[in-house]
């Protein structure tokens, strides 16, 4: 019985400090077989995180929820919600894209606009984590993959 109790004890998540690159309001990270995501620690941060895993099978651990995904994943993780990394060498995914943004990345009053009520509600629901499926997962994933070329273009335009 003692060992079972030990297994049920969950370590405290560690705080992860996130700092976007100079001149950016969000962080964009892309992991693949040449750049493996090594952050598999149980952690949290105040930033909202959108994660797209292109293909593969793995486990998601968000808050007190543990489940599996197949054929990739698209997850919206709310502010300060503990979670682990979603891919490793055994996942078999093509790539993993992580976009992290502060809750006020669009300004202090943006979400008070009537047109943004649904988006604000989405971010509120995301405080418990949201997994997307089907065509939504694939469509948003393609947009997220496209952010890389826009980010690279912005770097060239700054010079």
Image (spheres, helix red, strand yellow):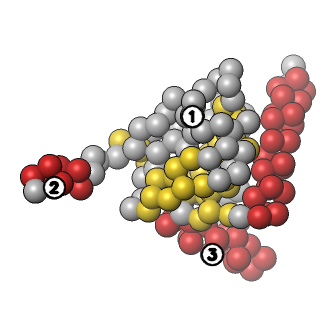
Residue 81 can be seen, yes or no: no
Q: Position of residue 133 (x, y in %)?
A: 71, 64
Q: CA distance from mark 2 to mark 3?
A: 37 Å
Residue located beneath label 1 in the image: 90
Q: Nearer the viewer, residue 143 or 64?
A: 64
Eye-nearest disc, 2 or 3? 2
Q: Residue at x 56, y 71 (%)?
A: 124
What label sits on residue 34 in the rendered view? none
Q: Quadrant of the N terminus?
A: bottom left
Q: Residue at x 40, y 44 (%)?
A: 42
The mark that comes first in sequence, 2 or 1, is 2
Eye-nearest disc, 1 or 3? 1
The mark that comes first in sequence, 2 or 3, is 2
Residue 34 can be seen, yes or no: yes
The crowding category of the residue bearing disc 3, from other C-alpha atoms within 10 Å (few below 14, some 14 to 19, many at least 20), is few
Q: CA distance from mark 2 to mark 1?
A: 29 Å
Q: CA distance from mark 1 to mark 3?
A: 35 Å
Q: Position of residue 159 (x, y in %)?
A: 87, 19
The crowding category of the residue bearing disc 1, from other C-alpha atoms within 10 Å (few below 14, some 14 to 19, many at least 20), is few
Residue located beneath label 2 in the image: 5
Callout 1 secondary element: loop
Callout 2 secondary element: helix
Q: Nearer the viewer, residue 4 or 137?
A: 4
Residue located beneath label 3 in the image: 121
Q: Position of residue 87 (x, y in %)?
A: 57, 39
């Amino acid at each position: 019985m003692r060992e079972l109790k030990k297994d049920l004890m969950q370590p405290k998540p560690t705080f992860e400090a996130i700092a976007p690159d100079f001149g950016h309001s969000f962080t964009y990270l892309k992991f693949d077989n040449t750049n493996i995501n090594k952050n598999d620690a149980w952690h949290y941060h105040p930033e909202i995180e959108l994660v797209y895993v292109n293909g593969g099978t793995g486990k998601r651990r968000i808050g007190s929820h543990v489940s599996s995904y197949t054929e990739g994943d698209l997850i919206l993780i709310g502010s300060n919600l503990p979670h682990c990394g979603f891919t490793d060498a055994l996942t078999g995914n093509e790539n993993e894209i992580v976009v992290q943004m502060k809750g006020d990345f669009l300004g202090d009053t943006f979400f008070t606009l009537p047109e943004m009520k649904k988006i604000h509600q989405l971010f509120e629901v995301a405080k418990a984590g949201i997994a997307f499926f089907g065509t939504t997962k694939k469509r948003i994933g393609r947009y997220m993959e496209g952010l890389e070329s826009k980010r690279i273009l912005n770097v060239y335009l700054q010079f």
